[in-house]
Every structure is written in C-alpha cells, then in structure tokens.
Amino acid sequence: MTTTGQEVDRTRPAVHLRIGAERLEKGSGGVYEHVDPATGQVDARIPLAGVAEVDQAVRVAHEAFASWRRTPPAERRRLLARLADLIEANAAEFTRRGTLDNGTPLMVSGGFVPISAEWTRYYAGWADKISGDVTASPGDTGEFGYTLPQPYGVIGVIITWNGPLVSLAMKIPAALAAGNTVVVKPSELTPFCGELFADLVAEAGIPAGVVNILPGTAEAGAALVAHPLVEKVTFTGGPETARKILCACAEQMKPSVMELGGKSANIVFADANLDVACAHGVILPVATMSGQGCAFPTRMLVQREIYDEVIARVTAIAETITVGDPFDPAVLSGPVVNAAAVDRITTMIEQAEADGARLITGGGRLSLDGELSGGYFIAPTVFADVDPHSRLGQTEVFGPVLSLIPFDTEEEAIFIANTTRYGLSAYIQTADLGRAHRVAEALVTGEVLVNGAPNLAVHRPFGGLGLSGFGKEGGRQGVEEFLRVKAVGIAIA
C-alpha cells in the first residue's frame, strides 16, 4: 500500500563543521549535494571536511583531553545527564531532522529519540562508577597491587547513515563518561541530526573541543583513522570499509571497535505465539527503516509444520505496510537511502528469483505519483523457499527483503542459523523456555533476543562476531571499550 504525505516543515537546516567552538561554513573537502531520497532531488549543500580540518579537530580534541580527563567524574555525569535532558526536550526537531536525513518515516525516526536519550543518560551514570581492582600478596616479599582504568585520549568516531542520532548516542556518551574526547565523522548522507547534537553538546555545558563533529569525505575518514593523536577508532558501517580502517590501524597498532553488518536468523518454532512472531518478524526487517538495519531478523527460519500458515500470515502483514512520503504520519516505510541502494537491492531480488526462491509479495521498485515519482521506494518483499546457501541466504541486503526458510528439527535450525559468516544478532520465538536457553547458547552471535525482546537496550552489550565485527556498545562493556587498564604493584618490604 502506498500513500503520499501532508504539508509539514521540510526546511533543511544549515550544516557546519564543528571544531571546538568554531562553526565553519566551508571545508577543504568541498561540498556534498544532499539528495532527498523521497524525491531524488538535491535539497541541501553540505560542507565537507578534508585532511586539514581533521587535523585541526584532532589537535583541538587532544588539547581538550588534558582538562576533560581531570574533570571530576560527578561533573561529567551531570553534564551528560543534562545532554540527555536536552535530547528529550528537542524530540520533535530530532524527529524532523531524522526524516530529512535519510527518509526514515516520522513514526520511526521519533522512536530513536527516547532511545538516544536513554543511552546518553545510562552512560552519564557510569561516569562516577568506574573503578579498578585491588590485589594483595602477603608476606615480607609480597606486594600491594591495584589497577587504574584510564581514558585513551582522542577517539576517532565514524558512523554510518542509517541511524544518525542513535549512532551518535551509542558512541559519544560512553567515550565522554570514560574521560575521552572525540572527533566524529558522520556520513555526509545524514548531516542534519549531527548539527543539532553539536548544538546541544554546547548548550549542556560540555567544554568546547570535547566533542567535534564534521561531515567529510572518505579521505577525511582515512585521515582521522591514521592521525597519530587518535588513540582508538570506533566505526559503524560495512565490512569493506572496515577492512580499510583495520589496515590503517594496524600500521600504528591502534585498537578499534567494529560494529558491522548482519544476516540475523529469526527461528520460529511450532509452539511460538504466531501473532507476535509474524508481526515482529515482518515489521522489523521489512517496514522499519525500509529494512536498512544491521541487526534486523532478515532470515525467518520456520518449523515445517507451521510453514504454510506463517507464509500466509507474513504475506498478509507485508501487504498492509504503508509505503510513501516519510513526512506522512500514517507511513510506516519510506524510501531507501539513494539510487545506488535501489540498484543493489533490485539486483539481489532478481538474483534470488534466478536462484529459485519463490517470490511471495513485492519484488521491485515502486513508482509513486507527484513529487515522489523520483523517490527511491522499494516494495516490501518476501521470498519463500530460500536456499540458505544462496546469495540471498548469505548476503546482507540492507533493504526491505525477508527470506523464509523451512526447517524440521531444532538441530537443523541451529545449523542453518550458523551458516553465514555474520554473527551480530539472532532471534528465537518459542513457548519452551528450556529450548530458548538451549538454542541461545548454541547460536554463534553477539546477542540473542527471545519472543520479541527489544533491540538496542542500553543495559545489554551489543556487538558481533565474524563479518559483524568485534567490540561492544552498551552495558558496562560499552564504557570499558574506552578505558585502558594500567596495573600498579607496590612492594610491601
């Protein structure tokens, strides 16, 4: 189902390079012409940082680190808590900007605001709770020992385009709580949320130079990673870019966190609540963000005795998804991010049909009317009888495409789920708690969510294995990623 939207405020805010207290209107990286994915038309010109601005920002952050690391932890907590309050207070504008950034519908982009505030508030709470360990060896030749968790210094942050606000909130507050400063390169595809975030950082009272945000070219990202004053890199994106970053980090033995893609299995057993399992299993990977999420359950593994019923339920749900103007509050699914995404997704759909998968609904680009006629809309698409070893069964689509795969036994479901090189998330739908624990232990992934448990809960560590990367965001582990531990031993004698 498609729909067109209403008259709303679609004004594009100005974007700057934010270095310390400066707001630069130009950068040596040139200008990026931002395209509205709902119309396919250029709607803003974004200044881009080049190598010069990256070097300036890193040096400013390095200077700010000297005082920020000595800021009392309780004060860091207070400032981050204030930032969380400001994110909530600006919910309407963040929602609007999230839709301007990449065409995420208002009803979805609005949901990211409380999540982002919660991630910020959670790590505010960690700022004054970081502690080391004490050890002691008795006797005349013994020692008293302890550990000092210390911040790294300047953290290079590179984020992708699909969740611009929540990506900032998943990285920056934890780094700041630990006492680090950051230089952030958001995607040039999604610059508007980052501009407001930088405004609120300053309004919260966080000192200039602690957070620096500058959209930039690939050359700028490479310069950030390679800069000798950047002590660690945290990256969200795809494996291809991750490999380049890792090669650059290897030259300096620089540590990193890699939050990459996924091909998550959603295992639906015959005893599952099918109302919940089917709704969750379709809306999340097909409608939400038009399927452009790394942790979405894009492979639905269904026990054979309920396979036909699930196909019918899934098809009915997929065909009710509203696709259209992301500024229409009735729209659940908007465009994909750009023309290249359209080409990539439609090519994979065509390949899936050639490989023998059975197309149930959808299957290509949508042509909408009026100003949306040039938009990057893909029909919610469902395939049944997908070969787990086919391209569709193995490769991340990052679009509104769901694969249905039958299985007979618990062991077979685990085997199929573990056949990909990704290992980010997995999902289980069952009424048998013993089975849920058993299968969760056997799945080779960074997280397992059972019976509709929500994504991105800040108290849980999030991060994958294999092609899905390494390192954690969320939980205690998320702040520990931004600390290095020094051991101290003092001889007793």
Image (cartoon, grey):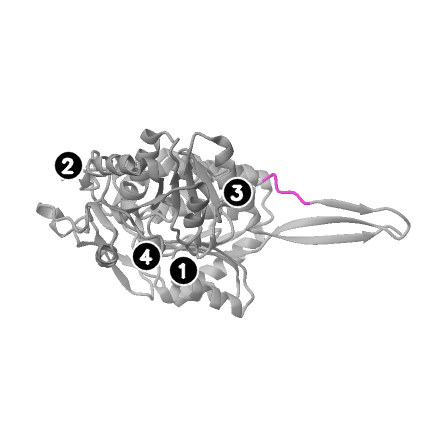
The residue pinned by badge 1 equals: 239
User: Is label 3 or label 2 in front?
Assistant: 3
Find the distance from the CA under tag 3 to the CA under tag 2.
48 Å
| Residue 305 position within the rendered picture, expressed as x and y whole percent measured from the top left | 34, 36
In which quadrant of the rendered image does the N terminus lie? top left
User: Is label 4 or label 1 in front?
Assistant: 4
Mark 1 closeness class: few <14, some 14–19, many ≥20 residues within 10 Å: some
- The answer to whether 246 is drawn above or below residue 170 in the figure is below
| Residue toward you, 87 or 342 | 342
Q: In this picture, which residue range is highlighted in magenta?
A: 128-132
Find the distance from the CA under tag 3 to the CA under tag 1.
26 Å
Q: What is the residue that sits farthest to the bottom in this orientation?
A: 251
Question: Which amino acid is tagged 3?
Answer: Glu
Find the distance from the CA under tag 2 to the CA under tag 1.
38 Å
Q: Secondary structure at mark 1?
A: helix
The residue pinned by badge 4 equals: 390
Find the distance from the CA under tag 4 to the CA under tag 2.
41 Å
- The answer to whether 175 is drawn above or below residue 233 in the figure is above
Q: What is the residue that sits farthest to the right in this orientation?
A: 140
Question: Which amino acid is tagged 2?
Answer: Gln
The residue pinned by badge 3 equals: 441
The residue pinned by badge 2 equals: 6
Q: Secondary structure at mark 3?
A: helix
Q: Secondary structure at mark 2?
A: loop
Q: Which residue does the image show at 31% across and 29% down from the upper left? A: 275
Q: Quadrant of residue 290?
A: top left
| Residue 258 position within the rendered picture, expressed as x and y whole percent measured from the top left | 46, 55
Q: Earlier in the sequence, mark 4 or mark 2?
A: 2
Q: Quadrant of residue 66?
A: bottom right
